[in-house]
Structures are given as C-alpha cells and as structure tokens.
Image: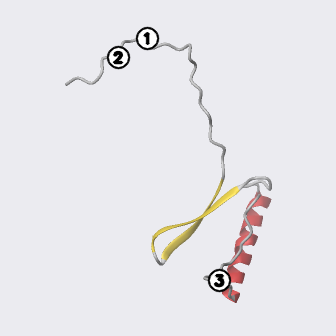
C-alpha cells in the first residue's frame, strides 16, 4: 500500500488530537491490509469529500489503471444509419 506521507502545513497546526486521529487511521489501514482488503503494493487515492463545511469525510480508494479500448477496425456496420427523424 502506497500513501503519500502526511505533511501538515502551517495553516493546519498539529495537535495531540490530530496526531491521535492519524495514529488511529494508520491502525485502521494496517488492519485492512492484514484482512486482505488491500495489498501492500496497491496505490491508494485519499480525498476529502462532503458538501457542507462541517460535513466532511475521508474517501480512500485504490487507484485502478484505466482500461484502453481499441475497437477492431475490421468491424463494419451491418445496417445503414438513418439518423434522427425530424
């Protein structure tokens, strides 16, 4: 599991409560790895979500490679396209 290290900015003071919360988050992520929900080599994306100021939550999801789809150029349309009727 690869997660960017936490680097608090000057705008976010690190308090005992913040350090405790980060410790709990670290333990929870380790439990997910140990349970097999995630693998150690998996990259994770961490985002803050929510629409209201006091209604925020953390979303952690694996980063998946985008599938590239290349259609077969040999496939031909079997029916003529009539277009949109007016």
**Sequence order check: which comes first, mark 1 or mark 3?**
3
User: Which residue is found at the position 62% from the left and 37% from the top?
Assistant: 67
Pointer 1 local density, CA inside 10 Å: few below 14, some 14–19, many at least 20 = few
The spot of residue 80 in percent (x, y) is 36, 12
The spot of residue 36 in percent (x, y) is 76, 54
- Secondary structure at badge 1 equals loop
Label 1 belongs to which residue?
78
- Secondary structure at badge 3 equals loop
User: Farthest residue toward the front?
Assistant: 10
Q: In this image, 35 relative to 66: left or right?
A: right
**Sequence order check: which comes first, mark 3 or mark 2?**
3
Seen from the viewer's position, the closer of residues 70 and 78 is 70
Q: Is residue 27 above or below residue 73?
A: below
Seen from the viewer's position, the closer of residues 4 and 35 is 4
Label 2 belongs to which residue?
81
Q: Is residue 67 above or below residue 30?
A: above
User: Which residue is found at the position 56% from the left and 23% from the top?
Assistant: 71
Q: Which mark is residue 41?
A: none
User: Farthest residue toward the bottom?
Assistant: 16
Q: Quadrant of residue 6?
A: bottom right
The spot of residue 62 in percent (x, y) is 67, 53
Q: How is the image coloured?
A: secondary structure
Label 3 belongs to which residue?
10
């Amino acid at each position: 599991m690869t997660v960017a290290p936490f680097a608090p900015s000057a705008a976010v003071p690190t308090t005992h409560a913040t350090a405790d919360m980060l410790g709990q988050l670290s333990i929870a992520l380790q439990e997910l790895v140990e349970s097999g929900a995630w693998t150690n080599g998996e990259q994770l994306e961490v985002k803050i979500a929510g629409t209201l100021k006091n209604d925020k939550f953390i979303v952690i999801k694996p980063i998946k490679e985008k599938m590239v789809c290349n259609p077969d150029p040999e496939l031909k349309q079997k029916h003529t396209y009539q277009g949109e009727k007016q």
